[in-house]
Amino acid sequence: MNKLNVAVFFGGKSSEYSVSLESAYSVIKNLNREKYQPVAVGISEKGDWFYFQGEAEQIREDTWLNDKDAIPAMLSPRRSDRKLLVFGKEGISSIAVDAAFPVLHGKNGEDGTIQGLIELAGIPLAGCGVLASALCMDKDRAHKLVSLAGVRVPRACVFRQRSAGEVGAFAEKIGYPLFVKPVKAGSSYGVTRVGDPRELEAAVWLAFQHDDEIIVEENIEGFEVGCAVLGNVDLMVGEVDEIELSGGFFDFTEKYTLKTSAIYVPARIDAKKAKEIKETAQVIYRALGCRGFARVDMFLTSQGEVVFNEVNTIPGFTEHSRYPGMMRAAGHSFQEILDKIMALAL
């Protein structure tokens, strides 16, 4: 059987560069080698592309970018090529690409930009396309579309400049605590839980470091639940998970260390509520035009109401990440999920 070359993109000019390295390592190690040959394409923190021919462990350890193993490269935009062009010392060579799997988090990786280049090149894409990726990265527009689909979303307002008076007035309207977030960012970068008005100015300043638009959003009393969704037309969902916090919110540190929080999968809720959350996740997934796979994050209030939070179109993909964990709890191994993702792409 001829193996298919899968370009696995990792790294990226994003604040989530390091997270991508961990995810890409796991994807490369777990792709079915009887069917697929990974072609590792690393993107440096400066945004430069390289064909990486070293060991997968070097990606995880962030030692991949060196003169021996990393060769400048680019994806040919010609649809008839479907190739990675490699600029070696002895000239230009090429590697056929049968499918592309971006394992990139945050801006320039999860927001539709690289998806557009892959689709322009005519290469089958694993995961969400351009529009869904861009929408899911944009918290404001995602919330508006999901609200139209009949799912409750938090009260929020977007600000495009630092108008302290307007931000303060809206904050007073929805009450404290509240959240200040960049409209387009991931892994909780630039997000602050604001407990009182004295903290508001610093939170706004921080959010504007990550995007030129910020969103001020009401705090939802309850806890966060998530649902892994896989599919294009017929959808498969994992078990619902639950995040238990001892304080604050699920920020970058907690997401990747779980120092003071815990994740329960399956969530500690009854079967009827779990079914409702799974159904709501599918409504959200379809409303935003997702395909391939995505993780849908929601809140469950103390009154039992499901409230939309966000969709991660390229969630963490280590073997211990939430998405594989939810699918594993539903009886699907990491290797099986990767196989299904590739089958959907092709």
Image (cartoon, helix red, strand yellow):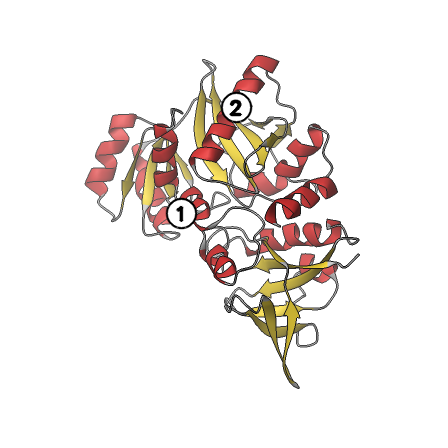
- Residue that numbered label 2 is attached to: 279
For the point 48% across and 26% down, which residue is it?
A: 299
For the point 53% across and 41% down, which residue is it?
A: 291
Q: In screen coordinates, is 203 left or right of 166?
A: right
For the point 30% across and 34% down, which residue is it?
A: 197
Q: In screen coordinates, is 138 left or right of 76?
A: left
For the point 75% across and 58% down, which residue is it?
A: 3
Q: Amino acid at mark 1?
A: Lys
Q: In screen coordinates, is 7 left or right of 14?
A: right
- Under circle 1, the secondary element is loop
Using the image as rendered, state which of residue 286 and residue 326 is in the foreground: 286
Q: How many marks?
A: 2
**Residue 91: % across, % down:** 63, 84
Closer to the chain start, of discs 2 and 1, is 1
- Residue that numbered label 1 is attached to: 184
The nearer-to-camera label among 2 and 1 is 2
Using the image as rendered, state which of residue 288 and residue 198 is in the foreground: 288
Q: Amino acid at mark 2?
A: Glu
**Residue 93: % across, % down:** 64, 78
- In the picture, the disc for residue 213 is none
Whether pointer 2 and pointer 1 mark residues with C-beta atoms closer than 8 Å, the reply is no
**Residue 251: % across, % down:** 51, 39
Quote the CA–CA distance across marks 2 and 1. Answer: 26 Å
The crowd level at tag 2 (other Cα within 10 Å; few <14, some 14-19, many 20+) is some
Q: Residue furthest left?
A: 165
The crowd level at tag 1 (other Cα within 10 Å; few <14, some 14-19, many 20+) is many
